Amino acid sequence: MRFVVALVVLLAVCGADAHAPRVASWRLTHAVRGWPGEVTSTDIGAMGVTGQGQAWALLAERSGSGRGSGPRSWSMLRWDGASWRRAPLPEGAEGSDPRFAASPSGDDLWLFTGDRPFQLTGGRWTHRPWRGAFTRASVAAGAKDDVWVSEYGGPDDYAEAGLSHWDGRSWSPVPQPSAYGHEVSRLAAPGRGELWAVVDGMGQARVIRWNGSGWAATPLPPAPGCPPAPAGGFYGMAARARDDVWLITQAAAARSGSCAVPDRGLVARWDGTAWTWPDLPLTQTWLPDVAADRVGGVWIAANPAHGQPYVLNFRNGRWTRSALPADGGWAGFVDIAPVPGTTRLWALARRGDGTLLLYELA
């Protein structure tokens, strides 16, 4: 009788465990000697993922020993489902300010290095020549063959903005939002033919939306606390849907008695009607990246001044936090890339000694 009771209890416990939600955990998948010098995150590397689970990483590595020694070289890695393997760089890829752009469904992946765009077609990177007049800025993919790239430049005393669209055959100019600003600094595309943009001009940042035929402004209320507007502008933008768009600022320094130096990163969200500022505990925290997926939700990378880097995930109306494993000497996240249609996330991080690490959260 005791055996039967024990068996029933055991089965009940196992059954409960089988249906209990599994806590996601980080897994280190690759590490290389990166660049320890004083470089920005866009000089270090970037990651991109397709809906089939293929992942790509472009990394700045170094040779030699010692701080800043040896020439910098760029390498391409490809995830084959079990490990990262070396892959040839696209011909002509310079590695300057690398950015990946994936469509929301993951059926289209692009790589931008400098002013050269490459589209992943049939497992190979195909160059799609783009002739911008100025410096390439932000990139976004709304669907397969629905890609956007912004640019900025001009004489020292005047800045100009530009915007181009790829329709599967060629690049074409999009009417400039000149009435709103001079630089299109951030782009996000929730679906085909729709685009969100941050434009900067006259010391202000405005958020506008392209509906396929024209631009419309979406007023942003003053940021909470001090200063009343985000100092340093917006550092990232992601669109999960037309009624679910996110912005992050890059502020993270300690206050020095002036509103010009905010002490935390800030997050703003468009809910389809208005922008709001979620109240998040981000004191002395740098927010290097934000990414969105229709299934996985919204991901925000966070590098606190003290403590381990972590990601915030907003899904089904609930926030969760996942800190990277303690490994000492952290410099923080560089880039994050969700796997479209899943709750998995890839992340590129860097240690203080310059080592680049590729993590998976699943």
Image: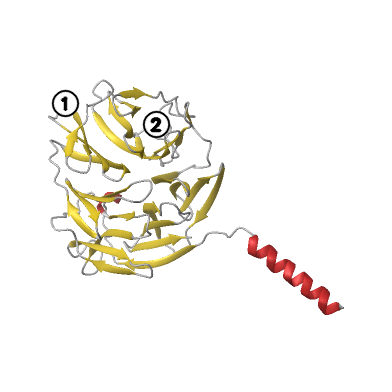
Q: Tag 2: residue type?
A: Pro
Q: In which image quadrant can residue 141 be found? A: top left
Q: Residue at x 44, y 52 (%)?
A: 341
Relative depth, front residue between 236 and 141: 141
**SS under mark 1:** loop
Image location of residue 44, percent across then percent down: 27, 55
Q: How is the image coloured?
A: secondary structure
**SS under mark 2:** loop
Relative depth, front residue between 165 and 325: 165
The 10 Å Cα crowd at callout 1, few under 14, some 14 to 19, many 20 or more, is few
**Which residue does the numbered mark 2 point to in the structure image?**
230
Relative depth, front residue between 233 and 24: 24
Image quarter where the N terminus lies is bottom right
Can you say whether 10 is above or below 240 in the image? below
Can you say whether 199 is above or below 348 in the image? above
View extreme (top): residue? 179
Q: Would residue 280 be seen by someone viewing this image from the given angle?
A: yes
Q: Tag 1: residue type?
A: Tyr
Relative depth, front residue between 74 and 332: 74
The 10 Å Cα crowd at callout 2, few under 14, some 14 to 19, many 20 or more, is many
Q: Residue at x 40, y 27 (%)?
A: 229
